[in-house]
């Protein structure tokens, strides 16, 4: 974890309500820092920085990427404590045939959170549930879209860090790119089907609308939300709705192209004792992809 904090320090210079369950591990890749499905285009090394930066606004672009996303969620509980989440989000595109691509994205959250405000509550750290999405997307389409299954794997034995349930459901993304503007939305819904019988069933939706603008200087400005709805809860605790403003710049990381991102958000709607505001920093390293 020391290396993760060190990397985060570089980023900032350059550029509880209880369990950290699916709402934490479904923190989707930011449009300004995510890559995915293969579409017909030149190799990244032949493209301008502005073109690459614009592709990073497309969650199903033709880029192999390794994003590291650092989140500090603040104002948790009556003592206004902080939860830290590092999302490691490798994205791997595959060409199934001339007309169809498959994009695999894994979100592995590493969480450190304060004790929940309940008797006997204790702080916890470790890996939360791992989410894997599979997007199937046409190689040529006027409107960019992808659809497929999503699976959540119980990856921790710490009750407050995960659901201890296997969950699955559909996921989809649709977007439009015009000039430097990218706008669209990503959504998924998961239901539990196996796991610890003593834990509550899972029925949760994730919705990420986004609008991004990329300049010729390879700066990308994004406004988005990463809203979750826990359908097992009635009343005010069902929705968690942050509004995030993010700025990213395409540069390099050693010999690789990389995007550096910094931003923050305010939770317009949140559960009791949930976070009220957040800070985010991220680096997305772009990898060579064999055609």
Image (spheres, helix red, strand yellow):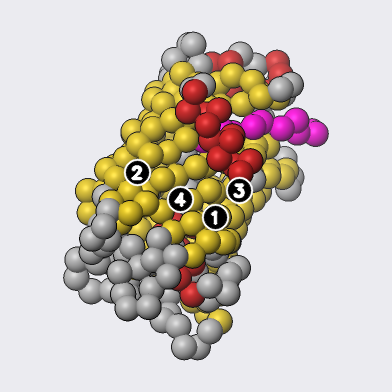
Give the mark, 4 or 1, whose residue is nearer the N terminus: 4
Instruction: Measure how far apart labels 3 and 4 are at the Cα level.
Output: 11 Å
Labelled disc at residue 84: 4
The residue that disc 2 covers is 278
Q: Is residue 176 above or below residue 76?
A: above
Determine the residue positioned at 45% across, 83% down: 199
Residue 109 numbered tag: 1
Q: Which residues are magenta?
A: 282-291
Magenta highlight on residue 288:
yes
Q: Tag 4 or tag 2, which sits nearer the N-term?
A: 4
Q: Secondary structure at mark 2?
A: strand
Q: Nearer the viewer, mark 2 or mark 4?
A: 4
284 is higher (above) or lower (below) than 113:
above
* Residue 15 seen anywhere in this rendered image of the structure: yes
- In primary-sequence order, the first of circles 3 and 2 is 3
Q: Residue at label 3?
A: 1
Q: Residue furthest top?
A: 217
Q: Residue furthest right?
A: 290
Residue at the spot 75% in from the left edge and 33% down from the top edge: 289
Residue 68 x, y percent position in the rendering? 58, 41
Q: Quadrant of the C terminus?
A: top right
Viewer-nearest of discs 4 and 1: 4
Q: In this orientation, which residue lies closer to the viewer: 192 or 108?
A: 108
């Amino acid at each position: 974890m020391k290396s993760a904090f060190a990397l985060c320090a570089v980023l900032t210079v350059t550029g509880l309500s209880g369990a950290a369950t699916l709402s934490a591990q479904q923190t989707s890749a930011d449009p300004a820092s995510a890559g995915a499905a293969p579409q017909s285009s030149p190799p990244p090394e032949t493209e301008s920085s502005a073109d690459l930066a614009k592709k990073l606004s497309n969650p199903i672009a033709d880029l192999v990427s390794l994003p590291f996303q650092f989140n500090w969620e603040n104002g948790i509980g009556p003592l206004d404590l902080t939860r830290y989440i590092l999302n490691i989000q490798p994205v791997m595109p595959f060409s199934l045939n001339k007309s169809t691509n498959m994009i695999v994205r894994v979100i592995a959250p590493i969480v450190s959170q304060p004790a929940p405000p309940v008797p006997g509550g204790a702080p916890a750290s470790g890996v939360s549930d791992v989410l894997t999405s599979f997007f199937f997307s046409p190689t040529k389409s006027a409107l960019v879209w992808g659809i497929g299954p999503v699976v959540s794997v119980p990856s921790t034995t710490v009750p407050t860090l995960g659901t201890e349930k296997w969950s699955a459901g559909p996921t989809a993304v649709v977007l439009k790119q015009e000039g430097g503007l990218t706008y669209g939305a990503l959504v998924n819904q998961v239901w539990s089907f196996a796991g610890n019988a003593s834990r509550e069933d899972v029925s949760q939706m994730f919705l990420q609308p986004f609008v991004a603008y990329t300049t010729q200087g390879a700066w990308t400005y994004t406004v988005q939300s990463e809203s979750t709805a826990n359908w097992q809860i009635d009343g005010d605790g069902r929705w968690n709705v942050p509004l995030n403003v993010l700025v990213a710049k395409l540069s390099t990381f050693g010999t690789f192209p990389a995007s550096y991102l910094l931003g923050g958000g305010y939770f317009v709607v949140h559960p009791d004792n949930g976070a009220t505001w957040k800070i985010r920093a991220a680096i997305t390293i772009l990898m060579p992809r064999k055609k």
